[in-house]
Image (spheres, rainbow, N blue to C red):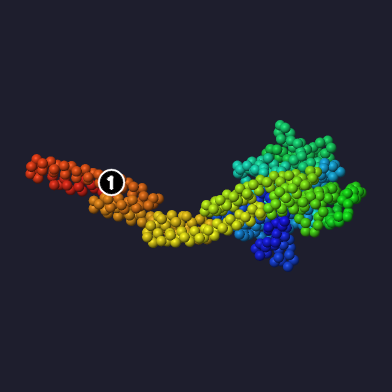
Amino acid sequence: MTNYMIGKVLQERYQIVQSLGAGVFGQTYISVDIENPKHPKCVVKQLKVTSLQPSFLQDLRLRFLAETRTLKHLGHHKQIPQLISCFEENERFYLVQEFIEGHSLSAELPINKNPNYFWSENGVIRFLKDVLSILQYVHSQGVIHCDVKPENLIRRTRDGKLVLIDFGSIQPVDFGTEEVLPIYSIPVTSLGYIPPEQFIGQTQINSDIYALGMIAIQALTGLTPLQLKKHPSNDEVLWRSKDTAVSDYVAAVIGKMVRYNHQERFQTASDVLQALKQIPVEPASQIIDAEYTVYSDSVKKNDYIRSTRISEKASDSTSSPLLTGMKVGLAANSMIIGFGAYSLVNHSPDYSEDQKLSVAQNEFQSGDLQGAIALAKSIPSHSNVYPEAQATIGEWEQEWQIAANKYEAAKLALKQNRWADVFLNTAQTPDIAYWKTRTDELVKQARASIEIQKDEYLAKAYEKAAEKDFTTALYYLRQIPKESSADELIQQKLAEYEQKQIVRATYLLQQAYNQAQLGKFDAAIDYLQKVPKGTPTYAKAQLKVAEYNSKKRFIAKLNEAAASEIRSKINNRDSFIRTNTSTRIQDFQMGTYLHEINIQ
């Protein structure tokens, strides 16, 4: 099945023609620039977006712009791809970079621990100097690559130079969060090259140096980092044996590059380069041949490899060790590099097996999980692709379960009109084309329902505001989801009605004061009880309610006392008013005892 992005045109210019695979930070594609008459190829990276919340997108947008400025500047180096463009489309963020014609370094590294294919010491030194010069520039710009590995070093066809690609993981030099790097989120091809401090969020400049040192060890021993043993007491890498063809000095340099404790390593790329300058290196005797023959199915690979070995042995006296290592590595790994092939993910010894995993990935994206797993499981255990296939199966099963759960949660939220939960769950759905198509439909339904609800609530809010019932008007406005098309208008109305509610509350409080001065405490309390909660005057209104109720009770007691005394005099047939009576006319002037408290 074809990936759902294949054929799409971004920015009315970049047409996606091939998927290169997915990583922690997003999906990578090959595209063609249809605006350019020559239709040149370029690499498009779609960054992974885990939430569509406006605040999250705004933060991501700012970080995206800052990082693209860094990438654009890094592209000034001749061995780093140039950043062509960056843009946002449909709440997705894209980088467009220079397409590097060539093959990955993994095609040159020895396999199966066969010493015939190991790199020479001189070849490793040249390799280290080449890549260290790139890292020296990268680090001088204030960033750390964080994912140096063979798949991210491309041997450029036109000049044989190594190019460092995939800066999706770059971090500032002062990167120092306390977040732990979850191992399940790391591509299997990166494991072993990542130093220990990077897993606990304490990445250093020399974290890149560690990764480069592990590649050098692989070139000298034929062992991948995950195949190397560690010392039981200090976790140092045990890589050198009596059969390893390397001098003590070079072994010491590489050993210091891969020390477990980053403080004991070389601190900068310049430090390593300085150490390597002390070693006399045999110069390359010829330019690396950039033309690779694509042989037909009728040509046996073994014959091709055998003839290459003979050719290399015959030219040992004139060819550079690095050139020899490259050619033998290419032959041993059976890498077939065709025109336009970009070896970002193609690093297996058998093209058909690698293609099988790619097809399985497409089937997984299209919705056939079981078919994809079955195809991936058919890759034999002796294949270099086998570890990646096994790890990918686990990732597929995990991502599929998460996607299914998020879809069901979003579906239930849609049924219950919980719009925010619909958007939250769909945004958290793993980037699988099959599930994205289904969740996109839920989002579409949610947005349609929101628009209907938005119109109803807005009409009710306007009606209540006209009646000066701003509390209810605000209630209706707050029921409208932020995802509606009128969110800007709603935010304006919320601010307007909140201000008017405060003015209304102040008016009601003043009316209550006026009634209290007239002794009309019941009317005053009626005004106070209309003061809305949440306004600055609400607390004062509640105090006044208690005060006026107290005064009402006091008046009632006085009235009751006066009435009782009058009734007593009448019963005794005394004069209604005597000069020596204890009850005087002024006793009925209650204002003497009921001064307003804190009226103003």
Q: What amino acid type is highlighted by mark number 1?
A: Asn
Q: Check the image and report above or below for 490 versus 522.
A: below
Q: Check the image and report above or below for 241 versus 89.
A: above
Nearer to us in this view, 373 or 32: 373
Q: Residue at x 86, y 55 (%)?
A: 297
Q: Residue at x 21, y 48 (%)?
A: 591
State left or right for residue 475 relative to residue 219.
left
State the image coordinates of residue 158 (x, y, percent, origin top left).
80, 58
Nearer to us in this view, 404 or 151: 404
Which quadrant of the figure contains the N terminus? Answer: bottom right
Q: Check the image and report above or below for 574 versus 362.
A: above
Quarter of the view holding residue 241: top right
Q: Give the residue at the far top of this rendering.
A: 233
State the image coordinates of residue 597 (x, y, percent, origin top left).
27, 47
State left or right for residue 23 relative to residue 406.
right
Mark 1, secondary structure of its residue: helix
Q: Residue at x 74, y 40 (%)?
A: 226
Quarter of the view holding residue 274: top right
Q: Residue at x 71, y 31 (%)?
A: 233
State left or right for residue 512 relative to residue 344.
left
Q: Is residue 330 at least partly visible in the picture?
A: no
The residue that label 1 is drawn on is 549
